[in-house]
Amino acid sequence: MSEPLDTGAAVSWNIVFFGSAEFSLPALKALHDGPDRVALVVCPPPAPSGRGRKLSPSPVAVLAEKLGLKVLEAKNFKNTDTIEAIRAAEPDLLAVAAYGGFLPQALLELCPFPPLNIHPSLLPRHRGAAPVNWCLINCDEEVGVSIIFLEKEMDAGPILSQRAFPVQGCECAGNLEKRLSEIGAEMLLNVIARLKTGENMAVIQNSERATVNPLLCKNDGLVDWNLPAAKLAGLINGVDPWPGARTPLDGKSLKIFQAAALPPREGHEPQPGLVLGLDEEARLLVETPDGLVALAELQPEGKKRMKAADFLRGYRPERLGQ
């Protein structure tokens, strides 16, 4: 590890930023616009995307080029030249946001402080992949952002800052993640400023309360109308935009979006999957064993995404899931 920094608040630090996805962009922009210098941006090399599977640069690479920042595209750190290139940037601090890979011990120890990482969950809950998705899928009452020091064990480092927010309405994982990325960028700058003053913010995580997320897969989007309404609403919103919630309809796949759980019909034996029509907010109502799920938008196979009222005029299904 290098010599300790002069932690005067007015000092400008050299920062090497690691990122890849859309989630990374607010943090990179905030660092670029802030008081410190982004000496290098590290991101994965171009990868196949779209129907044509053409090689496309990561969102972070695109933004870094637009901002005039130096970019290092690295798939992993097995090549010692990659680590030496990062060392040559003379960083005072490494910052990570959705990079998509583990940093080796040589980088964990490169600077006076361990690397900072923005993680969109209330750690130690939801360590690992897709934390925002799993927060909604598991019907958590709160979501949040944690800024931690990275260490060898995944997402287990000390917490430097954490903010929590109640889960509201039928916000999908994609929109919620975007909102949390912007909050995380603001928190990152605040943590860096506090590090410069020598403030001790680190709180050790309680590993006994830790949960670790599995990777999302396509089958996670399959809807079972025999599940409780709240669980179904959490699933539908949690897998949007990927892999997307879908249910059979007349032998084809129907995608469903923007779900809310509602109380059951009184005086009726529930019939899971039964379509009851539209509510006063023009959402499609579908029965579950313990309540109703209201769907704002749907997308039949081969068609465009549409409002529930438009879907009902064109299809008039009696039941979903068959």
Image (cartoon, rainbow, N blue to C red):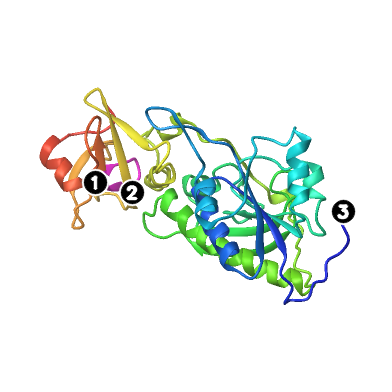
The residue wearing badge 1 is 285
Residue 313 at x, y percent in the picture: 11, 41
Residue contact between numbered discs 3 and 2, judged by CB atoms under 8 Å: no
Residue 54 at x, y percent in the picture: 44, 30
Residue contact between numbered discs 1 and 3, judged by CB atoms under 8 Å: no
Q: Which residue is located at x 38 percent, y 27 percent?
A: 52
- In this picture, which residue range is highlighted in magenta? 284-297
Q: Look at the image and say whether residue 65 sits in the magenta stretch.
A: no
Residue contact between numbered discs 1 and 2, judged by CB atoms under 8 Å: no
Sequence-first disc among 1 and 3: 3
Q: Nearer the viewer, mark 1 or mark 2?
A: 2
Q: Which residue is located at x 30 percent, y 36 percent?
A: 255
Q: Work out whether residue 315 or residue 277 is closer to the camera in this orientation and state it.
A: 315
Sequence-first disc among 1 and 2: 2
The span from disc 1 to disc 2 (Cα, nearest Å) is 10 Å
At label 2, the amino acid type is: Ala
Q: Nearer the viewer, mark 3 or mark 2?
A: 3
Residue 42 at x, y percent in the picture: 64, 46
At label 1, the amino acid type is: Leu
Farthest residue toward the left? 313
Q: Nearer the viewer, mark 1 or mark 3?
A: 3
**Residue 86, relative to residue 304: is it above or below?**
below
**Residue 83, relative to residue 158: is it above or below?**
above
Q: Which residue is located at x 35 percent, y 45 percent?
A: 290
Mark number, residue 61: none
Residue neighbourhood size for the residue with mark 1, other residues' Cα within 10 Å, grouped as few (<14), some (14–19), many (≥20): many
**Most frequent secondary structure within the magenta stretch:** strand
Sequence-first disc among 3 and 2: 3
The residue wearing badge 3 is 1
Quadrant location of the C terminus in the rendered image: top left
The residue wearing badge 2 is 259
